[in-house]
Structure formats: C-alpha cells, structure tokens
Amino acid sequence: MTTHTRESLRSDREALGGLLALADPERLRALADAILAEVVPAEQDLATAPAQDPTQDSAQDPSQGHAAPAPAFQITRAPSTGVLVGQVREPIASQRFIAGDLVASTAEVVLGEATGWGMRLGDDRAAALSQAVLDAEVLRGGDRTADIIELALATDEHLRAERAAEWKRLTPTIVEFEEIA
C-alpha cells in the first residue's frame, strides 16, 4: 500500500482524487462551500445556473467582438449518476471478467482557469460536485489546497486504521502449514 505525503498528493492527481472519492461527504461539502464562498460573487446563483456546453467558447462575447472575462465558477458537466462495468483480472489465469455493475456519480467544474473533476461510487451527486470543486482548487493552487491535502491524508489514515483493525480481527483465523523437507 502506497504511503502518501503532502508533497506526493500535490503532484499526484490520481492519488488525491482516489482519496477524495473515499472522503467523508460532509467534510467535502464543507470545504467546497468555503472555497465557493470565497470565489463566487454573491449574486451568482449556483443552484439555477445551467451547465455550459464545453464545446462552446463561453469566453467570447459576440456583441462586443472581444473576450469576456471568464466566470469565477462554472459547472461544465452537471452532476449525474450512471453505471460503470466493474471489470477485474483473475490472478491465477490472468483472465478478465465482469464482476458486476457499479453505480457512480460524476461532475466537472471550472474554477478560475482550472478544470476539476470528481467521481464517487454511489449516487451522491453533491459529493461528486464537491470533489470536482476541490480538485480544481488544488489544480489552481488555491488558498484551501493545504486543507484539501489534510482531508486526503486524514482519509488515508482512516482507511489504514480500518484495514489494520480488519487484519487484527482475521489474524486468529489464519491457518499455517508446515512444510516437510
């Protein structure tokens, strides 16, 4: 199991995203709310703002003939829930097989100039959106980056403690065989 550090999580987006996907949803939302409270103007209503088509150049203002300022926050892919195929590799014969379907929620946002993405197992679209906001905050090197890294490290520590407790519970059931030479 990989040991994560503050420095490794700043540069390893995949590891950070994996830990944030397992983080406590309430802590994700609280951090995302704090970030958006600092970045988004009070008059911008996030609940009613439609997702922008990512194929359209939203920074161009055709009536003015020049680029309009980019919005501080934009949902580029609204949170949605779908099904993924869970494919695994059988370790003995190294053959792949479909283990089953997984429900997952995804979202994508732009925060300043950074595009953030979030995916979580389950149907918690708000947590996926919060994860996308946190991802964008780290990518843009925002003020809350250290808090996000700390959340990821706390999640990592919690997962390690859970695994250690499970191994402690299972250890008495392990059967050991002696080899006869």
Image (cartoon, helix red, strand yellow):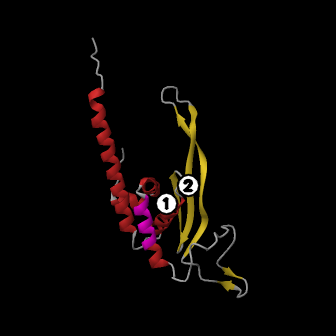
Looking at this view, is 145 or 84 the one in front? 84
Judged left or right of residue 89, residue 62 is right
Above or below, comparing residue 109 to residue 157 in the picture: below
Q: Residue furthest right?
A: 63
* Main SS, magenta residues: helix
Residue that appears at 57% across and 38% down: 100
As drawn, the label of residue 78 is: none
Question: Which amino acid lies under the numbered mark 1 shown in the image of this protein?
Answer: Ala
- Segment tinted magenta in the rendering: 25-34
Mark 2–mark 1 distance (CA, rounded to whole Å): 8 Å
Circle nearer the N terminus (2, 1): 2
Above or below, comparing residue 85 to residue 136 in the picture: above
Report helix, strand or loop for mark 1. Answer: helix
From the top left corner, tell me how far across and down residue 161 is, in percent.
30, 46
Residue designated by label 2: 105
Question: Which amino acid lies under the numbered mark 2 shown in the image of this protein?
Answer: Ser
Residue designated by label 1: 127
Report helix, strand or loop for mark 2. Answer: strand
